[in-house]
Image (cartoon, rainbow, N blue to C red):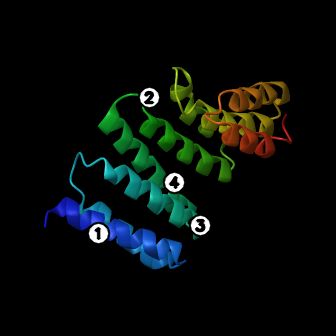
Amino acid sequence: MTQQNKAREFADRALDLWNDGQLDEAAADFREAIRLSEHGDYNTMDYHGSLGSILSELGHDDDALSEFESALRVAIDTYNNDSSGAVSVSRYFLAEHLLKLQREEDALSCIAPSLQIPNRQEAILRTVEAECLWRLGRRSDAKISARRAVSTAQSEEQREGMTVCLEYIL
């Protein structure tokens, strides 16, 4: 069995543990998956992102931030393109965590590169942008971003969800 297959097994088990609410055990397995993953394995980005989410859930925000940053680094190294869905999604999760930490300016800087070019993930990035701008007191800019989030949604279901989520801004 290759290192990559072993890493995938740990990650699969980690997902099951996470779904069962066994967060500490899931985090340990994701750490092992990361340790075993090979350079250039695009799954490593997912392992870091998932570990970041678990650590955030556990309240280990600094460690979670480090994992979200690692996920973005791997995505950029792997895809080298800010319009890539993987890079944009990594930016989204990192920016969401920065928002949790009340670091709105950092969150805006994080998503900016992916908003500069046409991007299928624009809607989710615009939701973060709208919330950041709202918190920073830039109400009219926040409303524009919120409307753009809704208008660039990929489906009616996503559009409805964003409308509800951004209702306080719209």
Mark pair 2, 3: CA separation: 27 Å
Dot 4 corresponds to which residue? 65
For the point 24% across and 58% down, the residue is: 37
- Give, as a three-letter code, the residue at label 3: Glu
Picture coordinates of residue 54 (x, y %)?
52, 66
Question: Residue 57 shows which numbered tag?
Answer: 3
For the point 37% across and 50% down, the residue is: 45
SS at mark 4? helix
Q: Is residue 36 above or below residue 155?
A: below
- Give, as a three-letter code, the residue at label 1: Glu
SS at mark 1? helix
Disc nearer the start of the sequence (1/4):
1
Disc 1 vs disc 4: Cβ atoms closer than 8 Å?
A: no
Disc 2 vs disc 3: Cβ atoms closer than 8 Å?
A: no
Q: Which residue is more in the foreground, 65 or 34?
A: 34
Dot 2 corresponds to which residue? 82
**Can residue 101 be seen in this snapshot?**
no
